[in-house]
Image (cartoon, rainbow, N blue to C red):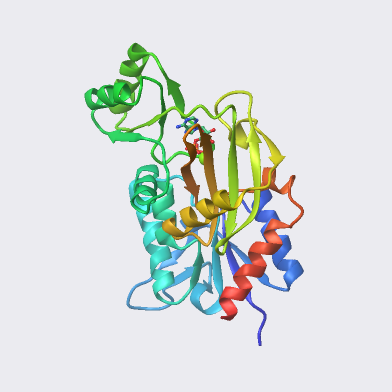
Amino acid sequence: MAALRFGLVTRNERSWSSTQLLEAMRRAGIESLCLRLPRLVARVAYPPAASSDDTDLLEKLSALIIRPIGRGSLEEIIFRMDLLYRLERLGMLVVNPPKSIERAIDKYYALSLLEEHGLPVPRTAVTESPREALRAFHELGGDVVVKPLFGSRGVGSTRVSDPDVAERIFHSISLHHGVLYLQEFISHGSSDIRAFVLGGRVLASMRRVAEGWKTNVSQGARPVPVRLGEEMEELAVKASEVIGCMVAGVDILESEEGPKVIEVNSQPGWRGLQTVTRVNIADEIIRYLISVVKK
Ligand SMILES: Nc1ncnc2c1ncn2[C@@H]1O[C@H](COP(=O)(O)OP(=O)(O)O)[C@@H](O)[C@H]1O
Ligand SMILES: [Mg+2]
């Protein structure tokens, strides 16, 4: 059998996680091809259906690994997603599946699905109206986290506990056509849990210990080893399944009422996590993909 070849969709092939995946593929004897979504060509009614330079993706690749799909206009993002869907329909293994990327990227979509499947999530209100947002601010106890709907790495999230500040912020977000996503502030004692789920099991996890309330490693939080109990592991796996991820970084806050899932990342990095775990995460991802492709 010819060697397997996986495509790695990345904006930066030298980024830490991409480099890790490329090295893991080399160790596993898998050929790799780095791709950038903005450079792909899609064809309809004449072949090939998708290509990068002159490479026919469906013919040459057994799987496509998606790292962050990047920012773009609504048109660009929808086209990128449509292309991933098309590749999947035509038989390509796309990881994470486009459906799960779509669900995970939108914090409201993801949180509502989690709630519908009975998972504990914080009380959250979403609206385009600054007036309604101010009402929700009071409903949620006057201490909320306001997050960008499509944000990541803690960028742009703010804690608001002053009604005057809330009003100003809501109006200015609205002026820029942002959607107002408000969540009750959960006192988590400056740390939370990140569980890395791969193929239906928790592969690795960490406690992220911060100085303030934002526990993203990219905001300076420190990864600390943690052993999750069965309940936490089940919660993380279920959350990733509800969203439909094969690989996921699940963020869980520990509140006084118990754990609350705040988000599922469909394109998680693992640089911090790798420092507190023995398993080589990139090797495990590649090994898992090989097993799925060969099924
Ligand atoms: N409701 C909340 N209460 C307290 N802290 C929160 C809340 N929501 C988020 N945080 C903190 O902010 C961080 C970023 O929030 P998250 O929803 O994971 O968005 P991002 O996509 O930016 O990582 C979390 O890891 C957590 O530390
Ligand atoms: Mg997060």
Q: Is residue 267 visible?
A: no
Q: Using residue 94 as the reference point, say whether residue 146 is left or right of it.
A: left
Name the spot of residue 12 as percent of width and height, x first: 61, 50
Name the spot of residue 268 as percent of width and height, x first: 57, 49
Name the spot of residue 81 as percent of width and height, x first: 39, 58
As drawn, which residue projects farthest toward the bottom? 1
Nearer to us in this view, 152 or 33 = 152
Residue under the image location 36 percent in, 47 percent down: 115
Quadrant in the picture for residue 24: bottom right
Nearer to us in this view, 226 or 64 = 226
Quadrant in which the C terminus appears: bottom right
Residue under the image location 76 percent in, 68 percent down: 27
Quadrant in the picture for residue 223: top right
Residue under the image location 52 percent in, 37 percent down: 253
Relative to 248, say whether 295 is above or below: below
Q: Using residue 2 as the reference point, say whether residue 101 is left or right of it.
A: left
Name the spot of residue 224 as percent of width and height, x first: 71, 39
Total number of numbered discs in the rendering:
0
Quadrant in which the N terminus appears: bottom right
Q: Is residue 147 visible?
A: yes
Nearer to us in this view, 251 or 282 = 251
